Amino acid sequence: MSDDITPVAAGFVARFAERTLPAALGPESDQVVLFSEEELDGFEPASGYWRRTVGRAELDWLVLIRTVGAFGGEPCIVLDEDDDGLHIAYTGHSGMKAEALGYWMVDHGAYEVVVPREEVFSIRVERIPVP
């Protein structure tokens, strides 16, 4: 893996009022909650950060960002990184392949494992537009 790409946690990011901000969906289906580390106009304080709920129509764009790659020739998503390596989740379609690669089942059809960073290939950050 290239050291140029640092794995990031998955999450939503929105463009609002000429700013790119972390976001969350809801509470209503047509709403998004925006977050800021600094006080911004229209944002309310909330335990060490600021937040504001807006309508999705008020956003310039909304994307889901996630780090993906391949482990053992199978697709995965990077959940976290620590001193032990990368915590990844299997995104293929065969539980038997996942188990053969050393993943453990964390829920029905969901498999995770921690592996050395150098064993995960083709790591890239995806930006998936949210309509």
Image: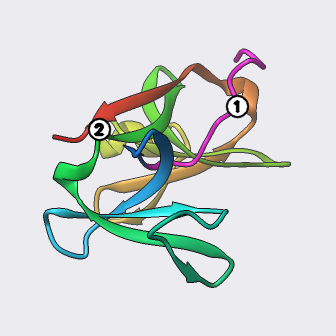
- The reply to whether the C-beta atoms of the residues labelled 1 and 2 are less than 8 Å apart is no
Badge 2 amino acid: Asp
Residue carrying label 1: 6
| Nearer to the camera, 118 or 39 | 39
Label 1 neighbourhood size at 10 Å, few (<14), some (14-19), many (20+)? few
- The answer to whether 120 appears left or right of 71 in the picture is right
| Nearer to the camera, 28 or 106 | 28
Mark 1 or mark 2, earlier in chain: 1
Image x and y of residue 1, in percent: 70, 17
C-alpha separation, residue under disc 1 versus residue under disc 2: 26 Å
| Nearer to the camera, 99 or 125 | 125
- Number of the front mark, 1 or 2: 2
Image quarter hosting the C terminus: top left
Q: Does 11 appear in magenta? A: yes
Q: Residue at x 39, y 30 (%)?
A: 127
> Where is residue 38, by image quadrant?
bottom right
Find numbered disc 1 in the image and state the secondary structure of the residue it sits on: loop
Image x and y of residue 57, in percent: 16, 50
Image x and y of residue 100, in percent: 47, 39
> Where is residue 42, by image quadrant?
bottom left
Q: How is the image coloured?
A: rainbow
The dominant secondary structure in magenta is loop
Find numbered disc 2 in the image and state the secondary structure of the residue it sits on: loop
The image shows a total of numbered marks equal to: 2
Query: Which residue is outermost to the right?
Result: 83
Q: Does 13 appear in magenta? A: no
Residue carrying label 2: 60
- Magenta part of the chain: 1-12
Badge 1 amino acid: Thr
Q: Residue at x 25, y 76 (%)?
A: 27
- The answer to whether 109 appears left or right of 117 in the picture is left
